[in-house]
Image (cartoon, grey):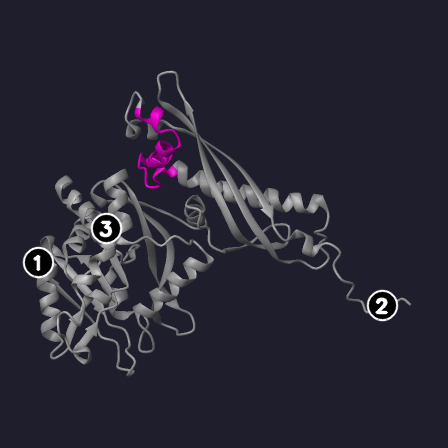
Amino acid sequence: MRRALAVMLSLLVFLPVSGCTLSVYNNYRELERLQVIETVGFDAAEDGGVTLSISAGRDASGREPVRASASAQSVTEAMQELQDRSRSDELFFYGTGCILLGEAAAAETARWLELIARSESLRLDTPLFIVRSGEASELVTEAGGEESDITQIMQALMHYAEKSGPARIYTCADAARALIENGAALTGAVRKGEDAPKEGSLTAELDGYAILGGKGRLMGYIDGEDALGVGLYCGEPGRAALTLSEGVTVELAGGSVELVPAWGEDGSITALEARVSVDAIVLEALPGLELGSDEAREAIERELAGRAGGWIYNILSKSVSLGLDFLGLGRRLERGDPERWHAMSSPWSSMLPELEISVTAGAELLNIREFAGAPDWSGTYEQ
């Protein structure tokens, strides 16, 4: 497995130029005959086999989306079976924009990442999502019903996540690199849901992040609002809207997390303080709420800071409790003090589960002055 992961790492180096080798024109394929596969799903089948599911989406001519699945002992065999079913159209996987992995298959995510890295058809820079408590094939072949498809659904979800948070979208390359460097990784997670406007129609919904451990084994999830902490930790919080108890709705506008280690006398790291800073803008407030005073502003900023600090504390605590550095804490600490890091008395992996975590947080409302001295809407005119 170490050798396989090393091969994956070497392939990551050539990722930016990998598209040059599979040009449609270089392979002399007729564009009209290409069926561009936009979403791919992998599920674990019996006896170590695989179920491969594909969705081609709708093309410009309005042709119905192609959705199919095949089970075989290998992905190559499953691809060939699907190709045989497609008659005259040639399945073109290099346009794939999303890969879904069933939860059972996520027990050995490294297997699929290695396959993608070696594939001549799939790309490592493709976003990767794990289907919580479900199979990828169900979403790929059934989501969207007759009017939509999984490709449109996933594109909308990724656009929403990048805009409104959690903003971090992980690719196969991100997961492979993190597993090789840190022994753990994060990837997006979705769950099955019902499309409310279309009663009974299956859809996909964002559902936090999946945590991968050694060999890419699924070890747990980051749930709910804590997923926003991942984006904040990475400096990409998105523009999530939060309603606070003071009757104010704010939108995240930026933030950062600084890690401050506490060093023991033996040269080991014994504790870790996270200093969280978050910026936001006020979108709206309840009628009659006076935001111009320092007291009101401080109360809102204090609540926002506590909420953001809670996200960071929860994800750091999960990293410690699992003993998995899925956030890349070690890499960041090494960059902060490389000399001291390399002189540590024990390996980082043995220190992580014993760390004491503390968080301090601050927040700033960037547009609070706009709400000071609100206009008089009573219509009273004084000459």
Distance from Cα at disc 1 to Cα at disc 3: 17 Å
Q: Say which residue label 1 marks.
A: 73
Distance from Cα at disc 1 to Cα at disc 2: 79 Å
User: Which residue corresponds to the image point at 34% horizontal and 39% vertical from the top-left?
Assistant: 328
- Amino acid type indicated by mark 1: Gln
- Tell me which segment is drawn in magenta: 318-342
Distance from Cα at disc 3 to Cα at disc 2: 66 Å
**Location of residue 133 (image quadrant):** bottom left
Question: How busy is the neighbourhood of tag 3: few (under 14 within 10 Å), some, or many (20 plus)?
Answer: many
- Amino acid type indicated by mark 3: Ala
- Asked if residue 25 lies left or right of residue 371, the reply is left
Dominant SS of magenta comes to helix
Based on the picture, tell me whether residue 340 belongs to the magenta stretch: yes
Q: Say which residue label 3 marks.
A: 106
- Amino acid type indicated by mark 2: Thr
Q: Say which residue label 2 marks.
A: 380
In the image, residue 104 sits, relative to residue 72, either above or below, namely above
In contact (CB < 8 Å): disc 3 and disc 2: no
First along the sequence among labels 1 and 2: 1
